[in-house]
């Protein structure tokens, strides 16, 4: 069976409520706000109601891990990354390397926030914008940023 | 627990953060905290547009923590009424502020050059706005969003348009995507301080005392907001859902409150907008309901060439520049709203003032000398656009005066009998009866949302109730809304936030409040608010009901002078503010 990953299936239905980001911070960390969210809903400047949802692609050969100079970010089984906090030097190279800007940065702790693909964000989306799906091979062109 | 207040002195350019735990412990947040802060830092001697005049913003304990707790409260002295100015706005402002750890803002002083305030985490910086002073409200949002995007994952931009820079007392402050601190002239107060915008970069998280209980209360509220019927109306048609029901009961103010029936209501209803021009719903941060209606206005400007803009619409703008001006198509209403959005006026005040100007012109109170040849007629979109063009470029004394509001214009040019304002503020879109009028007279911000007067009127159509009972319910609702506005939740979610869930929600944050204590707090806060209002010269018995209101038929019949006087006496008695 293939691993599951996140996919943006209905970008155009996003209303920008950020319930997904709040869910991530609340359900995984027991905190309020969106500061620990492993994904992001980006609002474009100058266009009313244009949102872009950035969720981890669960890359099998992640650019973020490759950019890490200390080996703090490593490829997880089934794709995606895991973080060894002891090794992280807070350089931010990983976040810069994620071209789709899915990997988020914890401003309070100075570390990246790898997605663990639990699907909590999906549970709180009122409009089925994101979904947990069996991931396709990356080579197939199934991206997760829309 | 909340405690941090950011003080900004624009004259010296200095900022500082002070902790005041007792203030938030005793007064929750929002409107109660802001009232106390304005009482501490302002006084009746200070002119609304003086550099000394303070502007207060406050969020509450539920901000960024519970769904639909999306509003921020602004308090100031109103340049439109000279009295207490209070306005609430949604968007992302409350959520972004919470993530910076700032719970209230006190802005005083005035800069000698255009500036914007950037709050980044707990640091605040006063930056030059020299390059974009003069820009429209939407353009200012575009500019700052692009400039600051990398500074935090949640950015909120509160800004004024040219109307605020010109110190129009009906200028608003616009928040993110077309949410507004709309009423009572905050835009002019910011303009007088040369404060073009406030940008907040939120990026933190909020510690929770009892995460497990928090998750449980959250789930209940989330389910109510998303799945219950209580918010369905807002989720689907948004506030424009009101157009047809109000028209059906003859409560939709039309052509300067001449009647409560608009013959073309079905063409500009929430349903018609949805069908013809709506392209999307969007939401304030942390509101899965998403009531903000966005339309696309596509116009041909040259052969084979079109321009397209997105314009947000709501019930009140549809009333203010639609039925009030007798405009019968969504496209024309959107053109008027788009103009108003760019300038940054309060759409309700501008629509009502244009309606007064039209009646004044048609009845001969003013003539072509004043309008410099421009003929004003109900239904004439082109003339209204031309009028607003002249207002915004200060062409001619009369047009320059129009952005000072209905009360100012009527006292200068005449037509007082049909000048629709209560203590200087133009009313919202309800011609339902005496309870609605009572809200505009006695409400703390003279807003239709201060209590449920317009809703009480509608209930009377189904079942009569004694006058005393009506006023008692109105006062109790006004008191209860002090609680909701201190938390600060969106009032569209008032049905899902009952006293028990509020007490439970506060409990998860380590704040011990019983239902009884909440109710008592609401009553006390209302009294505190009236004390502050009185210090600014508020006298409920001094507010005149426009003469025209006694000569039009409302949903519930005619307004009676003696009954209104009796209602007011009872209101003051029941609220303990006599």
Image: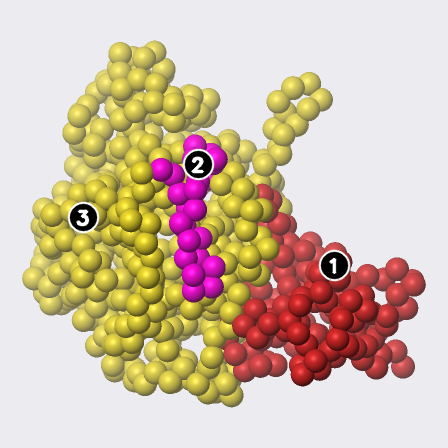
Position of the N terminus of chain B by quadrant: bottom left
Query: Do we see residue B278 in this rendering?
Result: no
- Considering depth in this image, is B182 or B459 the residue closer to the camera? B182
Q: Residue at x 37, y 66 (%)?
A: B103
Side (left or right) of A5 relative to B437: right
Secondary structure under the numbered disc 1 in the rendered image: loop
**Contact (CB < 8 A) between labels 2 and 3?**
no
Gap in Å between the C-alphas at discs 2 and 3?
Answer: 31 Å
Residue B184 falls within the magenta-colored stretch: no
**Contact (CB < 8 A) between labels 2 and 1?**
no
Q: Residue at x 31, y 38 (%)?
A: B112
Q: Which mark is residue B130?
A: 2
Disc number lying in front (2 or 1): 2
Gap in Å between the C-alphas at discs 3 and 1?
Answer: 51 Å
How crowded pointer 2 is (Cα within 10 Å; few <14, some 14-19, many 20+) is rated as: few
Counting from the top left corner in percent of width and height, residue B469 is at 19, 67
Chain letter of the residue carrying label 3: B
Residue identified by numbered label 3: B83
Write down the region rendered in magenta: B113-137
Counting from the top left corner in percent of width and height, residue B160 is at 40, 41
Q: Residue at x 52, y 79 (%)?
A: A31
* Location of residue B427 (image quadrant): top left
Work out whether B342 lies above or below B175: above
Work out whether B60 lies above or below B373: below
- Considering depth in this image, is B477 or B473 the residue closer to the camera? B477
Residue B123 falls within the magenta-colored stretch: yes
Counting from the top left corner in percent of width and height, residue A141 is at 88, 60
Q: Earlier in the sequence, mark 2 or mark 3?
A: 3
Chain B shade in the render: yellow
Query: Do we see residue A71 in this rendering?
Result: yes
Chain letter of the residue carrying label 1: A
Q: Which mark is residue A100?
A: 1
């Amino acid at each position: 069976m293939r691993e599951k990953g996140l996919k943006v299936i209905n970008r155009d239905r996003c209303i920008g409520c950020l319930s997904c980001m709040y869910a991530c911070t609340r359900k995984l960390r027991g905190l309020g706000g969106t500061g620990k969210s492993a994904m992001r809903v980006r609002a474009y400047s100058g266009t009313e109601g244009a949102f872009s949802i950035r969720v981890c692609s669960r890359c099998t050969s992640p650019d973020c891990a490759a950019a890490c100079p200390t080996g703090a970010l490593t490829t997880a089984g089934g794709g995606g990354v895991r973080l060894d906090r002891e090794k992280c030097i807070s350089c931010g190279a990983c976040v810069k390397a994620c071209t789709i800007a899915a990997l988020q940065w914890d401003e309070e702790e100075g570390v990246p926030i790898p997605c663990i693909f639990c699907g909590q964000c999906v549970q709180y989306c009122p409009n089925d914008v994101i979904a947990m799906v069996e991931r396709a091979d990356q080579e197939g062109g199934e991206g997760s940023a829309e | 627990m909340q405690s941090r207040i950011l003080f900004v002195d624009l004259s010296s350019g200095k900022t500082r953060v002070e902790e005041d735990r007792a203030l938030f412990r005793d007064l929750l947040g929002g409107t109660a905290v802001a009232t106390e802060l304005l009482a501490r830092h302002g006084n009746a001697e200070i002119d609304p547009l003086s550099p000394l005049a303070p502007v207060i913003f406050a969020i509450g304990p539920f901000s960024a923590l519970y769904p639909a707790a999306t509003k921020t409260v602004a308090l100031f002295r109103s340049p439109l009424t000279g009295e207490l100015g209070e306005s609430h706005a949604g968007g992302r402002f409350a959520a972004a502020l919470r993530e910076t750890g700032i719970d209230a803002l006190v802005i005083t002083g005035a800069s000698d050059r255009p500036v914007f305030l950037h709050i980044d985490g707990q640091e605040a910086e006063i930056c030059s706005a020299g390059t974009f002073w003069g820009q429209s409200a939407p353009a200012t949002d575009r500019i700052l969003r692009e400039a600051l995007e990398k500074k935090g994952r949640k950015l909120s931009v509160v800004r004024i348009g040219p109307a605020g820079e010109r110190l129009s007392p009906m200028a608003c402050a616009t928040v993110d995507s077309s949410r507004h601190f709309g009423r009572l002239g905050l835009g002019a107060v910011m303009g007088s301080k040369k404060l073009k915008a406030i940008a907040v970069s939120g990026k933190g998280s909020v510690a929770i005392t009892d995460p497990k209980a928090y998750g449980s209360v959250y789930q209940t509220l989330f389910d109510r907001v998303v799945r219950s019927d209580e918010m369905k109306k807002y989720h689907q048609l948004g506030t424009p859902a009101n157009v047809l029901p109000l028209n059906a009961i003859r409560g939709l103010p039309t052509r300067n409150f001449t009647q409560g029936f608009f013959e073309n209501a079905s063409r500009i209803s929430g349903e018609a907008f949805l069908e013809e021009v709506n392209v999307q719903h969007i939401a304030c941060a942390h509101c899965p309901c998403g009531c903000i209606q966005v339309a696309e206005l596509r116009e041909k400007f040259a052969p084979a060439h079109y321009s397209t803009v997105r314009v947000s619409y709501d019930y009140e703008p549809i009333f203010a520049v639609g039925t009030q001006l007798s405009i019968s198509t969504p496209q024309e209403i959107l053109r008027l709203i788009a103009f108003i959005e760019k300038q940054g006026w309060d759409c309700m005040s501008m629509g009502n003032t244009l309606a007064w100007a039209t009646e004044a012109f048609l009845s001969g109170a003013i003539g072509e000398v004043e309008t410099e040849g421009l003929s004003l007629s109900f239904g004439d979109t082109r003339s209204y656009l031309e009028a607003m063009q002249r207002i915004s470029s200060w062409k001619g004394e009369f047009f320059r005066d129009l952005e000072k509001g209905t009360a100012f214009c009527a006292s200068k040019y005449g037509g007082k009998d049909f000048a629709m304002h209560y203590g200087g503020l133009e009313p919202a879109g309800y011609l339902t009866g005496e309870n609605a009028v009572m809200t505009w007279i006695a409400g703390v911000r003279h807003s239709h949302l201060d209590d449920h007067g317009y809703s009480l009127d509608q209930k009377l159509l189904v079942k009569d109730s004694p006058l005393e009972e009506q006023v008692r319910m109105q006062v109790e609702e006004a008191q209860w809304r002090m609680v909701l506005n201190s938390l600060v939740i969106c009032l569209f979610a008032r049905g899902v936030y009952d006293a028990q869930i509020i007490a439970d929600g506060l409990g998860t944050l380590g704040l011990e409040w019983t239902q009884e204590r909440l109710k008592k707090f609401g009553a006390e806060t209302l009294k505190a608010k009236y004390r502050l209002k009185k210090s600014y010269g508020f006298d409920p018995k001094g507010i005149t009901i426009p003469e025209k209101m006694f000569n039009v038929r409302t949903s519930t019949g005619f307004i009676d002078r003696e009954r209104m006087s009796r209602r007011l006496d009872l209101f003051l008695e029941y609220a303990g503010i006599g």
